[in-house]
Amino acid sequence: MHLPPGSTVAYLSPEFGVSARLPQYAGGLGVLAGDHLKAASRRGLPLTGVGLFYAHGYFTQHVDASGVQHALDDDVDPDAAGLARVPDVAVHVDVAGEPVAVEVLRAEVGSVPLYLLTTDLAANAPAHRAITDRLYGGDQRHRLHQELVLGIGGVRVLDALGVRPDVFHLNEGHAGFSALERIRRSMVDDGLGWDEAVAAVRPAGVFTTHTPVPAGIDRFGKALMEEHFSAWCDELEVPLSALFELGHEPGSPRDGTFNMAVMGLRLSGATNGVAALHGHTSRTMFAGVWPGRDVGDVPIGSVTNGVDPATWTAPEMSALLARHIGASWPDVDASAWAAVHDIGDDELWEVRSTLRGALVNEVRRRLAVTDERNGDLSRATEIVLNPSALTIGFARRFATYKRAALLLGDGERLVRLVGDADRPVQFVFAGKAHPADTAGQALIAEVVGAAQALGIADRVVFVEDYDMDLARTLVAGCDVWLNTPVRPLEACGTSGMKAVFNGGLNCSVSDGWWDECRDPDNGWVIASAEHESDPEVRDALERDAVFTVLERAVVPLFAERNTAGIPQRWLTMVRHAMAELCPFLDAGRMIDEYTTRYYLPAVTGSPTNSSEH
């Protein structure tokens, strides 16, 4: 389904993961945003991306021999990153009474333009030049300044470019101040009153929430909001209390904090979570915004995330799919994926073995570089990992709820698992912890330290500096993608989707997208002990569940071979998972859902389906 001619969508996000050479992403939120733009291009959707250009990106991760993470600044060269400065487009944003100049860089994501805003200009004071210095850096004041530039500056840049969006899609609450700029314009330019302006901007707003926990939401104190919005309120002759009410979280003090997600909910005509389970979690978490409604009637729907097949499918697997499905396999109808069942065991196994071997070679290369830098040449990297062993991947942001070190809690059992010479198993870990997240950094040190202490560092490895390039290698080469979050704290978790396109199988807690896609023929479900309130007991129960699934199901199935040395039943599961899941996990399906259920109703003024779940 297409939008009416002349209509367009603005997609605002704090981060965009388009490619590794443009490091403007920290994790899943940004990579999802990049895939959103790519899918929009594939579908011919008139969409414009708006974000910030971070001069130092996120950070380069070095991990020393003790497992300690060191965060180094990236210095991003706009020219090398494929960006072009947009001439004659400059706007100003008021930051605590000071006008800050904003200029624009442009990237092309297929047919979709991506505009990245920067304040690193000679015309600005040093403190203001630093607003767009790095992704998720600094304190609350710094974060507020970035969100002013992204939200208010984003709307002004679009106007200066002559782009008149019919839909403003906010990828999380970081760009929420864009709605305030639209309210201001409705009052100043169109002469509307406060309540009329709020009602006028709401229908064009689409708000996607990505967090299932209140702690993950941006909140700003009243004093900070007053400092930065008093002049805004004075211009519109609106009391600060009226503005503050938009971000007031029900149940909290009226003069407490301003909740960006709550404002996003109140100023959007449609809201969604990023998986079916996450939609349910969001309706529960935000039910107070709609007092008097049952949780089931809270108008928050869900659109399960997807990934861009062309980005995440290895060339070898892409060529195999092209031979059996057709050269345009990423864009075929779901029914065409049945052709995957016709792929022969020998050719599928050859591709899977090639991709696993490529992973092993790349990991060895990276570990050699790490060891040389750390001055530790004791590890014989040429024998690290086995290109024929069952390879299990765990690569994602190192946040505590994802429990990267869960299996390390039973070292003896882990040693037995990876030490079986007849049924070899190995684990590859990767991921960054935010520089301020000491608990996440401790998990990295625990993974590295435990592997060394248990004498299995050649079979349980941590690869530093997880980025899109390394991610492509890992999702392609791993046989199993392991996911062990505390349910239901994984909003979606798209890394496992990417593995499916490469013939990898998922072994996961029933959380995020896996909760709606799990099937005994698609992969394995790790039993969740949600009933257990003691975190340590719950971890112990779920640790046992992971080991049990690996020992009794995953490892035996991979080890079962025919006379030609091919795991036929394993490959049957691979084909089934690809045929059943790939059409659904494609970001093209995601874009189609957004278009039909959210964008088109916003453009035409018809009722939205946001409450369908």
Image (tube, rainbow, N blue to C red):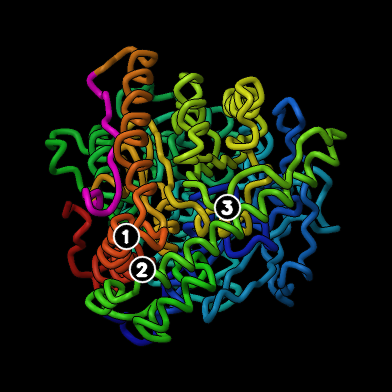
Q: Answer with mark 1 or mark 2, whichever residue precedes in sequence.
A: 2
Q: How many residues crowd mark 2 within 10 Å: few (<14), some (14–19), many (20+)?
A: some
Is 63 situated above or below 597?
Answer: above
Magenta region, mostly helix, strand or loop?
loop
Residue at coordinates 51% horizontally, 37% vertically from top-left? 421
Q: Name the residue furthest front.
A: 563
- Tell me where residue 83 appears, x and y as whole percent: 71, 71
Name the kind of residue labelled 2 in the image: Asp
Residue at coordinates 38% horizontally, 80% vertically from top-left? 329
Residue 286 seen from this side: yes
- Kindly state the secondary structure of the residue where label 2 is placed: helix
Disc 1 vs disc 2: Cβ atoms closer than 8 Å?
yes
Residue at coordinates 37% horizontally, 16% vertically from top-left? 535
Frontmost residue, 548 versus 612 = 548
**Which residue is under mark 3?**
387
- Tell me where residue 612 appears, x and y as whole percent: 16, 55
- The CA distance from mark 3 to mark 1 is 19 Å
- The CA distance from mark 1 to mark 2 is 7 Å
First to last magenta residue range = 517-531
Q: How many residues crowd mark 1 within 10 Å: few (<14), some (14–19), many (20+)?
A: some
Name the kind of residue labelled 1 in the image: Gln
Q: Is residue 79 left or right of residue 560?
A: right
Frontmost residue, 442 versus 251 = 442
**Which residue is under mark 2?**
345
Q: Is residue 354 left or right of residue 407?
A: right
- Kindly state the secondary structure of the residue where label 3 is placed: loop
Q: Answer with mark 2 or mark 3, whichever residue precedes in sequence.
A: 2
- The question of residue 229 being in magenta is answered with no
- Tell me where residue 524 appears, x and y as whole percent: 29, 43
Rendering quarter of residue 397: top right
**Which residue is under mark 1?**
568
Rendering quarter of residue 40: bottom left
